[in-house]
Image (cartoon, grey):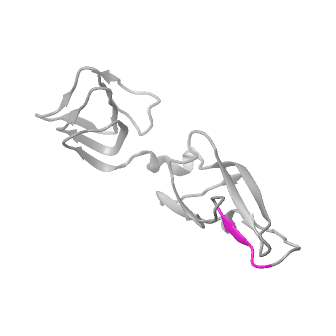
Amino acid sequence: MIVFRLGSRLSFQVTPASMVSNTEDNCSDPVQLSFSPDFSTPSMMLSCREGLQDPLELTIYIQDGSGNVTTCVIPQVFVPAAEAEDCLCDQEQLHLQNDITSDDYKAKQTITADGSIQPNDTVMLKAEQSITLSPGFSAAHGSYFAAKIDSCGFESGTDLTA
């Protein structure tokens, strides 16, 4: 199990070498590590959202100088919710304009929306202080829209469904 301690960071870069230690190879150097089987992904960015709900499973591909390839599966990579509470909010204030596409939008303080939600789109807004639906905001028939005033995350609060 690997636990990421974020501090104030919202995303971070990881390399296979930062996740695998004490590796040995009797064959030949150099050893190449990657997150992809074609060895084209020597690092990856993870946001603080990854691993919050369910642990991630990451596969590391290892190739020695002779071309021998093996894998190492790390089954539980996660960020403790207490470490990433601020991560659950996209930003302090959010202004949604034009086409508002399917997503969960979260803000630490306020959300203002004056765009439109198209049929078949699902849009969820959550802010800790206020959500303002300004002139020009619309949710088309066949769309799903929900707004909540609560701390970031969709566990509790007032659900205003249109």
The one of 71 and 93 positioned closer to us in this rendering:
71
Q: Residue at x 75, y 78 (%)?
A: 30
For residue 65, side relative to residue 92 (left or right): right
State the residue lying farthest toward the bottom.
29
The quadrant holding residue 113 is: top left
The quarter of the rendered structure image containing the C terminus is top left
**Image location of residue 118, percent across then percent down:** 25, 30
**Image location of residue 159, percent across then percent down:** 35, 23
- Against 107, is 69 above or below? below
Q: Residue at x 29, y 24 (%)?
A: 143
Total marks in image: 0
**Image location of residue 18, percent across then percent down:** 67, 67
For residue 51, side relative to residue 148 (left or right): right
- Against 38, is 116 above or below? above
State the residue lying farthest toward the front.
67
Q: Residue at x 34, y 44 (%)?
A: 107
The stretch of residues the image draws in magenta is 29-34
For residue 156, side relative to residue 136 (left or right): right
